[in-house]
Image (cartoon, helix red, strand yellow):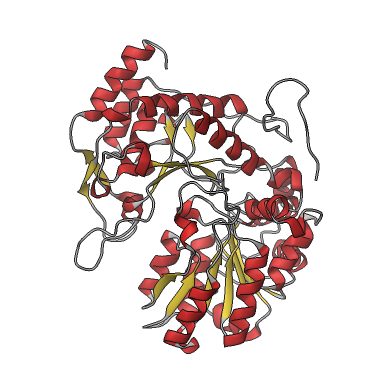
């Protein structure tokens, strides 16, 4: 694989692109940031983007498009049915994944809705390497439950295990034998387990899981939304594939799955998604729901312009110098924060840099949402918007008590080809300052709490005036600096 070594000084990630179009950013004063956070109910999701300097909330739909993607958007065929743009996209999916049937959908959670409605029923059990918030909600709403079959090291905060996203096959087989394969509509593997630090799954584990599923006649469903990062990790961390190209790794993954679905807001750097399979019965079952929930079968709720961009974006994902951009910048950020003693999840995964809030603000009880409080503190200190991935991202139990998360993380997403190294270094500097002043941070409590996916819309308030105290300390240390 290509490498760039620096003759003098430490190696740093190298941008494999040049900037041709720019968008102005705003860096508000610390007092303005405090006011914005208060108005947002201490929920970074509710911040207005005009008040955000570096938006590290997510990589979904905010990755930079290439010049070729933008140019392709002008070729779109706007036909409602039978669009040639759809045919182009269908053929690209067939080429890369080797799946005959493709169903378009407007994004990944739409795919989850179709899959859950098609295969999950009352009492269903869906094993997976880790749940994602919307995935779990769709399964539960259709009467099923999620069981995570993961090895203990998956939840180790600091580890040298290169594939903490792997399934535990012994646990999986025990679960199948305990409940019977007829109660398990499918097993789900998520590329780059989102809620435990973007940790990848090995190709060997995918192949072994597929073999076990075949033994019991159970479908293997693969969430490929974060496939790009996972492809990078397979190539650089899995010895068997160090000389394989990205295209062949992709095809081998697809050959060992029954259904693949993805959000193109992540995979392909466009706004759309889809489901593909070689199983005609599964295809026909899901196909009926596309016009009902998404749109006609040749657009599925997507703009045809985005579909054109998606075709190019999927092809560009086969380029190692594209898929390496996220993981290498994330690894740099994780490494620099480690040098400064800031607690982070290791090894560095995909999607973003993940701060370990359980250690960062260990004085805050989980019932007071330490990761949410830390995300609010980071915004006040820097204008950087991250995302809480902890207890706040869980829904309450049926008895009203909290479902305490396995991990309390603040995810600082690294959208592909968006941030410069100086912006990443700014983030490192401000997060280090927050860590050195972590004793000032206290918890949050709900003011307005939705019953489902509360982390999207809920409003919270600080348990004390700690946000004002943090602002005063920032002013004391930085003066008039932003």
Q: Looking at the image, which residue is at 67% across and 33% down?
A: 13
* Residue 439 location (% of width, % of height): 28, 29
Q: Quadrant of the C terminus?
A: top left
Looking at the image, is 162 positioned above or below residue 83? above
Quadrant assignment, res 421: top right
* Residue 126 location (% of width, % of height): 46, 75
Q: Quadrant of the N terminus?
A: top right
* Residue 271 location (% of width, % of height): 58, 53
Let me know if residue 162 appears in the view.
yes
Q: Looking at the image, which residue is at 37% across and 19% down?
A: 29
Residue 347 in the figure: left or right of residue 466: right
Let me know if residue 289 appears in the view.
no
Q: Nearer the viewer, residue 294 or 461?
A: 461
Q: Nearer the viewer, residue 192 or 241?
A: 241
Q: Nearer the viewer, residue 405 or 303?
A: 405
Q: Looking at the image, which residue is at 77% across and 66% down?
A: 95
* Residue 399 location (% of width, % of height): 19, 67
Looking at the image, is 16 positioned above or below residue 236? above
Quadrant assignment, res 450: bottom left
Q: Looking at the image, which residue is at 27% across and 48% down?
A: 366
Count the marks: 0
Residue 420 in the figure: left or right of residue 383: right
């Amino acid at each position: 694989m290509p490498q760039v070594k620096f003759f003098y000084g430490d190696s740093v990630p190298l941008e494999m692109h040049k900037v041709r179009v720019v968008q102005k950013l705003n860096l508000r004063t610390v007092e303005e940031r405090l006011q914005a956070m208060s108005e947002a109910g201490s929920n970074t999701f509710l911040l207005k983007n005009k008040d955000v300097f570096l938006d590290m909330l997510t990589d979904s739909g905010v990755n930079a498009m290439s010049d070729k993607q933008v140019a392709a958007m002008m070729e779109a065929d706007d036909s409602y049915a039978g669009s040639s743009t759809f045919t182009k996209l269908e053929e690209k999916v067939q080429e890369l994944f080797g799946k005959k049937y493709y169903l378009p959908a407007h994004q990944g959670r739409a795919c989850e809705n179709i899959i859950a409605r098609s295969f999950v029923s009352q009492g269903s059990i869906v094993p997976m390497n880790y749940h994602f918030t919307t995935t779990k909600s769709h399964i539960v709403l259709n009467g099923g439950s999620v069981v995570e079959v993961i090895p203990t090291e998956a939840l180790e905060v600091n580890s040298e295990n290169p594939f903490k996203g792997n399934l535990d096959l012994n646990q999986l087989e025990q679960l199948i034998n305990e409940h019977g394969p007829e109660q398990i509509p499918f097993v789900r593997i998520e590329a780059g387990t989102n809620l435990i630090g973007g940790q990848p799954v090995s190709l060997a584990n995918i192949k072994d899981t597929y073999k076990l599923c075949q033994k019991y006649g159970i479908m293997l469903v693969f969430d490929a939304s974060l496939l790009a990062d996972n492809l990078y990790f397979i190539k650089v961390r899995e010895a068997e594939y160090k000389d394989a190209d990205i295209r062949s790794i992709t095809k081998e993954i697809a050959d060992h799955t029954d259904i693949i679905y993805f959000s193109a807001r992540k995979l392909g750097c466009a706004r759309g998604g889809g489901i593909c399979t070689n199983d005609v019965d599964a295809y026909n079952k899901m196909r009926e729901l596309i016009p009902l929930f998404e749109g006609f079968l040749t657009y599925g709720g997507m703009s045809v312009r985005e579909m054109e961009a998606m075709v190019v974006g999927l092809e560009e994902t086969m380029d190692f110098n594209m898929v390496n951009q996220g993981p290498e910048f994330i690894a740099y950020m994780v490494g620099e924060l480690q040098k400064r003693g800031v607690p982070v999840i290791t090894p560095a995964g995909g999607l973003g840099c993940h701060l370990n809030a359980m250690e960062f603000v260990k004085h805050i009880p989980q019932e007071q949402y330490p990761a949410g409080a830390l995300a609010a503190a980071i915004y006040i200190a820097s204008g950087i918007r991250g995302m809480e991935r902890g207890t706040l991202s869980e829904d309450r139990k049926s008895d009203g008590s909290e479902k305490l998360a396995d991990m309390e993380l603040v995810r600082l997403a690294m959208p592909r080809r968006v941030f410069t190294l100086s912006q990443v270094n700014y983030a490192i500097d401000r997060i280090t300052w927050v860590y050195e002043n972590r004793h000032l941070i206290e918890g949050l409590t709900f003011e307005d709490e939705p019953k489902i996916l509360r982390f999207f819309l809920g409003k919270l308030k600080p348990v004390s005036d700690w946000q004002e105290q943090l602002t005063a300390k920032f002013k004391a240390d930085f003066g008039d600096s932003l």
